[in-house]
Amino acid sequence: MLIALLTQISLYFNDLYEFRSTDNALDIASRLTQSIGMTSIALALFYFIWPEMIIGRWIFFVSLVILLFFLVSWRIVYSIAIRRRFFSEKAFVLGDGDLANDILGAIQERRDLSYDIEGIVAPENTHNELERGNIISVYRGFEGLCDLAEEQKVDSVIVALDEKRGVMPYNELLNCKIRGINIIDGESFYERVSGKLLVEKINPSWLIFSDGFVKSRFIRISKRVIDLVASAVLLVLSSPVIFLAALAIKLDSRGPILFFQERAGEFGKVFILYKFRSMKSNAEEETGPVWATEDDVRITRVGRIIRKLRIDELPQLWCVFRGDMSLVGPRPERPYFVEQLKNKIPYYNERFTVKPGVTGWAQVKYPYGASEEDALEKLKYELYYIKNMSFLLDLIVIFHTVKIVLLGRGAR
């Protein structure tokens, strides 16, 4: 159990559960070798501390050789199966607009998906150019859709029409459904394969009738109890780091140790967020409220270190303990930017239906955002989190956050 657990953790930290790792056999072998090396070092430390756990010197080394051989072999076989599209399901995409393009792009990014797009079935009166590399056949008109699907041995039809009113071929789709062909809603399909909501395309009725957005009293109380206990424990455990960070900030530059800033919380209620000061004192005195940028000249020497290691976020645990924030949720935004963004981005107000978090689904899936375009992209992930909020999803976010922090990724 110990070997299996440490091996999986090592594989995870070497990005071997990321889909891009299936591209190159040599890259897979290299990452797997590094993972086995990390596992060996970790096991050596465990055996040094608890010698009674040693399973036998030669058994240990033979096990590592066998483990490496089978892991490499399995990963190469898996990579070949993904590239050659074994066990794939044939599908049609109904539509040739932006939603269809987004779905095709999501499928192309996710090579592990078991969908082969056999063709695009588009309305007769449209001639949009799809970003498909001219390798997917386009059929005009919905008449005879079921016969065409059966002729091409298609298993599913993904409905990706930008405008459904007066265009949706209900009779043809019903006929396909009765014949045993799976009909998939395009917006729901995109959500499932990308981990985000396509906010530019979904309409209120889709949000109303779709699954999710469950926030029962039990879930809210349980989440609050977990936040309260976890924040208290983390504050105690991180107290030495907090003390050293405070001392370093004080010695490095003039100004207060802590940085106070107003943020919009649940239901838009403004609260005070605490962070370790990582910028020069009065950094926005001349510029006014602005997003941080890469290589921001306002960041101090110590600030650059604590931002990279996310130590500057530790005081936010007090906000969690106090009840203004949660460990996991959408990041709290400044009221100044909220007023701008909610008038430009659809469904932006919906992100305030839950407490903001120290970390979140958008933070682990998307890099630091410093523009309105980034805010829109992050909102897609935030709404996905709110729609699918659960303890399991929170654990996934926390696990990803630990990896990001330890590897120093995405900080600005």
Image (cartoon, grey):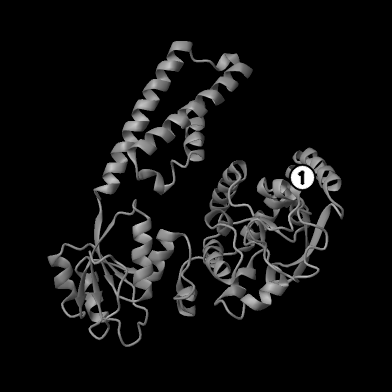
- Say which quarter of the image contains residue 399: top right
Is residue 12 left or right of 241 when viewed as pictured?
Answer: left
Q: Amino acid at mark 1?
A: Leu
Is residue 170 left or right of 42 when viewed as pictured?
Answer: left
What residue sits right under mark 1 in the picture? 235
Is residue 201 left or right of 167 when viewed as pictured?
Answer: right
Quadrant of the rendering where the C terminus is positioned: bottom right
Q: Is residue 314 visible?
A: no
Q: Is residue 321 above or below residue 134?
A: above
Is residue 156 left or right of 349 when viewed as pictured?
Answer: left
Report how many numbered discs are placed on residues in the image.
Answer: 1
The residue tagged with tag 1: helix, strand or loop?
helix
Q: Is residue 160 visible?
A: yes
Image position, residue 372 (x, y; %): 58, 71
Could you tell me which residue is drawn at 57 percent across and 43 percent down? 403
Image position, residue 379 (x, y; %): 56, 67
Q: Is residue 235 above or below residue 199?
A: above
Could you tell me which residue is drawn at 77 percent across and 66 percent down? 284
Q: Is residue 21 above or below residue 34?
A: below
Image position, residue 191 (x, y; %): 43, 64
Question: Dot 1, how many residues are within 10 Å of its Cα: few (below 14), some (14-19), or many (20+)?
Answer: some
Could you tell me which residue is drawn at 58 percent across and 79 percent down? 344
Question: Which residue lies most toward the bottom here?
Answer: 166
Question: Which residue lies most toward the front here?
Answer: 297
Image position, residue 192 (x, y; %): 42, 61
- Say which quarter of the image contains residue 273: bottom right
Q: Nearer the viewer, residue 83 or 201?
A: 83
